[in-house]
């Protein structure tokens, strides 16, 4: 029984690491597209600098959420991480939606942003279900 729980924990940790890695790569890809392409930058919801800041910040948030969900944390840290995950997922989804509906070749940036927003939301869900560490109280 203990061996099955240990296997399940390792599988969950691996899945969470892959989720955060995928989201980070997608977000940094969007940041690169916005930074390099003038056409994509013009369609960006927050402008060039704002979109790069949002996507890089979102990559940081999803990595932080993966660490908090894997290692556990106190209730305040979990609350801040969960709230920032929700806010960032909304910002990235909004930017992705604008990319999708804009005229031109920004569809790839939009799809990457929307998939990243879903992965960020899943990471936030994992933070909400993470265990509270005994030392955090």
Image (cartoon, rainbow, N blue to C red):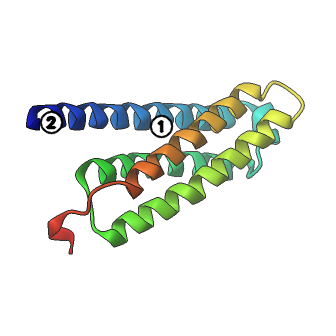
- Res 21 seen here: yes
Quadrant where the C terminus is found in the figure: bottom left
- Label 2: element kind: helix
Answer left or right for 116 relative to 124.
Answer: right
Residue 61, image x and y in percent? 45, 52
Residue at 81% x, 40% y is 43
Mark 1 residue crowding within 10 angstroms, few (<14) / some (14–19) / many (20+):
many
Question: Which residue is pictured at 72% across the width and 45% down the height?
Answer: 95
Element under disc 1:
helix
Of 32 and 104, nearer the camera is: 104
Q: Quadrant of residue 112?
A: top right
The vertical placement of 120 against 77, above or below, is above
Upstream in sequence: badge 1 or badge 2: 2
Q: CA distance from mark 1 to mark 2?
A: 27 Å
Vertical position of residue 128 compared to residue 116: above or below: below
Label 2: how many residues lie within 10 Å, few (<14), some (14-19) or many (20+)?
A: few
On screen, residue 73 versus residue 51, left or right, reads left
Pointers 1 and 2 in contact (C-beta within 8 Å)? no
Residue at the spot 46% in from the left edge and 51% down from the top edge: 125
Outermost residue, bottom side: 137
Does any portion of residue 48 appear in the rendered image?
no
- Position above or below: 107 against 6: above
Which residue matches tag 1? 24
Depth check, front residue: 25 or 75: 75
Farthest residue, direction right: 103
Q: Position of residue 80 (x, y in %)?
A: 43, 67
The residue located at (72%, 30%) in the rendering is 37
Q: Is residue 75 above or below residue 129?
A: below
Q: From the top left corner, tell me how far across and down residue 108 is, in percent.
A: 70, 25
- The tag on residue 6 is 2
What percent of the width, then of the height, locates residue 85? 51, 55
Figure quadrant of the N terminus: top left
């Amino acid at each position: 029984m203990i061996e099955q729980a240990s296997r399940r924990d390792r599988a969950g940790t691996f899945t969470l690491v892959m989720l955060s890695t995928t989201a980070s790569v997608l977000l940094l890809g969007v940041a690169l597209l916005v930074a390099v392409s003038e056409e994509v930058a013009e369609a960006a919801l927050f402008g060039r600098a704002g979109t790069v800041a949002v996507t890089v910040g979102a990559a940081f948030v999803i990595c932080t959420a993966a660490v908090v969900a894997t290692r556990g944390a106190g209730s305040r840290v979990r609350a801040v991480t969960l709230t920032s995950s929700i806010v960032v997922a909304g910002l990235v989804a909004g930017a992705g939606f604008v990319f999708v509906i804009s005229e031109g070749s920004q569809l790839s940036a939009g799809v990457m942003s929307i998939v990243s927003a879903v992965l960020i939301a899943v990471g936030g869900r994992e933070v909400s279900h993470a265990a509270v560490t005994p030392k955090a109280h």
